[in-house]
Image: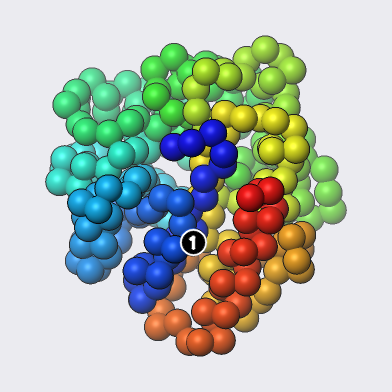
Amino acid sequence: MSNRILVSHESPISMLDQSVVYNDYDYALVHLFEKYPEYYDFFKKSVTRGRSVLLDNSIFELGKAFDSDKFANYIKELKPNYYIVPDVLEDGYSTVKSFADFTAKYTDLPGIKIGAVQGKTYDELVDVYKYMSEYADYIALSFDFSYYLVTGRGKTKLERFCTGRQSFIKDLINDGIWNWNKPHHLLGCSLAKEFSYYPNNNIYNIRSVDTSNPVVAGLQGLTYNGDFGLQDKPSVKLADLIDTEVTPDQLRDISYNVEQFKEILKR
């Protein structure tokens, strides 16, 4: 992946072929492979065509990481460029153990290992960040830590998530903890406007972002307010809309939102 922030917007199966036009890489949710063979086939073809594929362990959708043995088998079959090692929501030390156990058990998996940071306090998050900085190839930071609700600014939960991740990254940099030599991935988003902060502040090793926000908004008939995005966020997850047949009006709204998201990233 290049030095500019690359983006992938998870999309319904009916839009996957079109998604290669607006996505810089393809982001796969492993738990959908079993129920939707056509979904798996798309990503298999992406690998064959030489597109970058990132395989997620679906923790955000399932509440816990997908079964480790099945996940490892899918990594072997699919051969993604990147995969997120199974983690544990907001439990830093269990996440470290999960990362250590998984990588020790599966030593021959293809692809780059992404380590997700987890935790509830700054000290715990820093401990896990330092571990991933040493042992993972790529570091991922989530958008919705409860920690951000304490540290973030704003009247709404979404605003505090938005500013909370910015503040966390700023604190890591100011405290000399941020590893400028490792690429970073931002998992999801609350408000799209968050992402203008990173290019504006030359945080150049944030390499990739995934968010279905512009797509889900368009499916719900919502359009971005220019490059400001939305003040609210649809509560439904893209995975629950995966088999939606997209209408021309929805496609128009999605296309507009995706273009505005690029503007937010200064693309």
Residue 48 screen position, x and y as percent: 20, 51
State the residue lying farthest toward the bottom. Answer: 248
User: Between 115 and 148, which is closer to the camera in this rendering?
Assistant: 115
* The N terminus: image quadrant: top left
At a point 48% along the width and 87% down the height, the residue shown is 247
For the residue marked with disc 1, what is the amino acid?
Answer: Tyr
Figure check: 204 above or below 23: above
Image quadrant where residue 96 sits: top left
User: Between 124 and 192, which is closer to the camera in this rendering?
Assistant: 192
- The secondary structure type at the circle numbered 1 is helix
At a point 52% along the width and 79% down the height, the residue shown is 251
Q: Residues within 10 Å of mark 1 (few under 14, many from 20)?
A: some
- The chosen color scheme is rainbow
Q: Is residue 167 visible?
A: no
At a point 75% along the width and 38% down the height, the residue shown is 200
Mark 1 lies on residue: 22
Figure check: 247 above or below 33: below
Residue 104 screen position, x and y as percent: 23, 20
Figure check: 263 above or below 151: below
Left or right: residue 146 compared with residue 240: right
Q: Is residue 202 visible?
A: yes
User: Between 226 and 33, which is closer to the camera in this rendering?
Assistant: 226
Q: How many marks?
A: 1
Left or right: residue 265 compared with residue 58: right
At a point 74% along the width and 17% down the height, the residue shown is 174
Figure check: 164 above or below 133: below
Residue 130 screen position, x and y as percent: 52, 16
Residue 95 screen position, x and y as percent: 42, 29
Left or right: residue 161 compared with residue 134: right
